[in-house]
């Protein structure tokens, strides 16, 4: 009798929880709220959605979603609050089941959801304003040359309003780090921060034939990419394969921008199927922390 071959275990950590749509976990732009609410409306109309919730609760949710749609999702506090509530419930589903799939698991609705969301909106509106920051320009910018440059920009672009200038700086940095325009150096900087918070020793390599980061404690190599064309793949695969060969790597990760569409992200993940790269995971920058924590747990377990 022929023996049935057993499936070779994967050398990469399970990241199935990271493969749900990113708008399930966090809000990047207002359209993420729209996509999430519309998806839940469809979910509640499936057989297991109907089985888990009463018709009255489902009707209340759909009516609330319709009211939001009529007013528009952009700059709509009710849309923001409802989407926030949904993400809390999905996080609870994930904790209870070790992950979730809305084709299998049902979102449970409470009675009086409309009132719950309205009360949350009121609480957001009643939040006491933060008092103005009482700090001098000298404390903000101790370096005289940087302080002089900042004062010049404040006068030139913001009519002397320092708070407006700082708001513009932070907004620009946020857009740079989380949006489609994130540069490779932005992504590398975020990787460094996430590794540093976990006190992981890092060897940084910016050579043509090596991955960007080598983390000896996890036997992990990380390559950061802000784009991946067919030509980029031809360049990337030898780098990953060389790293596996030269460092006896246990884990490899390619980190990509957070705002890739799900379709583009799954196209990136096709490189996981490449020969001799069974230890490779392609992950978004926003999920790197979760991935590192998973690896740490795996290393402790041996």
Image (spheres, rainbow, N blue to C red):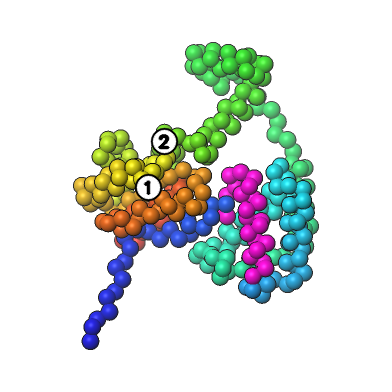
Q: Magenta stretch: give its range.
A: 24-46
**Alpha carbon distance from label 1 to label 2:** 13 Å
The answer to whether residue 97 is seen in the rendering is yes
Q: Residue 93: which quarter of the image? A: bottom right
Q: What residue do we see at 45% from left, 60% from top?
A: 16
Question: Is residue 106 placed above or below 218 in the rendered structure?
Answer: below
Q: What residue do we see at 32% from left, 53% from top?
A: 251
Asked whether 279 falls inside the magenta stretch, the response is: no
Q: What residue do we see at 31% from left, 58% from top?
A: 278
Question: Of helix, strand and loop, which mostly describes the magenta segment?
Answer: helix
Depth order, front residue of 273/134: 273
Q: Earlier in the sequence, mark 1 or mark 2?
A: 2
In the rendered image, the residue lying farthest to the bottom is 1
From the viewer's perspective, tell me whether residue 113 is left or right of residue 146: right
Question: Would you call the spot at circle 2 few (<14 residues within 10 Å), some (14-19), or many (20 or more)?
Answer: some
Question: Is residue 64 placed above or below 55 in the rendered structure?
Answer: above
Pointer 1 residue: 254
Q: Residue 186: which quarter of the image? A: top left
Pointer 2 residue: 184
Q: Position of residue 57 (x, y in %)?
A: 74, 67
Q: Position of residue 49 (x, y in %)?
A: 65, 70
Q: Position of residue 175 (x, y in %)?
A: 55, 35
Question: Is residue 133 placed above or below 57 in the rendered structure?
Answer: above
Q: Do labels 1 and 2 touch, CB within 8 Å?
A: no
Q: How many marks?
A: 2
């Amino acid at each position: 009798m022929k023996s049935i071959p057993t499936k070779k275990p994967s050398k990469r950590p399970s990241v199935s929880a990271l493969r749900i749509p990113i708008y399930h976990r966090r809000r990047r732009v207002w359209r993420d709220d729209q996509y999430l609410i519309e998806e839940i409306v469809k979910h509640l109309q499936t057989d297991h959605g109907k089985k888990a919730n009463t018709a009255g609760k489902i009707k209340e949710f759909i009516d609330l979603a319709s009211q939001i749609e009529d007013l528009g999702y952009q700059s709509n506090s009710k849309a923001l609050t409802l989407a926030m509530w949904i993400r809390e419930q999905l996080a609870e589903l994930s904790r209870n089941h070790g992950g979730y799939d809305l084709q299998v698991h049902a979102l449970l609705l409470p009675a009086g959801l409309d009132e719950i969301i309205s009360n949350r909106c009121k609480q957001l509106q009643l939040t006491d304003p933060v008092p103005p920051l009482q700090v001098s320009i000298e404390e903000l910018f101790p370096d005289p040359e940087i302080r002089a440059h900042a004062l010049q920009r404040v006068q030139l672009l913001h009519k002397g309003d320092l708070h407006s200038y700082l708001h513009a700086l932070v907004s620009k940095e946020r857009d740079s780090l989380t949006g489609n325009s994130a540069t490779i150096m932005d992504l590398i900087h975020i990787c460094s921060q996430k590794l540093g918070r976990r006190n992981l020793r890092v060897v940084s390599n910016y050579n043509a034939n090596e991955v960007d980061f080598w983390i000896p404690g996890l036997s992990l190599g990380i390559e950061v990419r802000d784009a991946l064309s067919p030509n980029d793949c031809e360049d990337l695969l030898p780098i990953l394969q060389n790293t596996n060969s030269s460092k006896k790597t246990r884990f490899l990760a390619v980190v990509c921008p957070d705002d890739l569409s799900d379709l583009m992200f799954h196209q990136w993940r096709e490189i996981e199927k490449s020969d001799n790269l069974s230890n490779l995971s392609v992950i978004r920058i926003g999920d790197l922390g979760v991935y590192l924590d998973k690896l740490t747990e795996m290393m402790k377990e041996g």
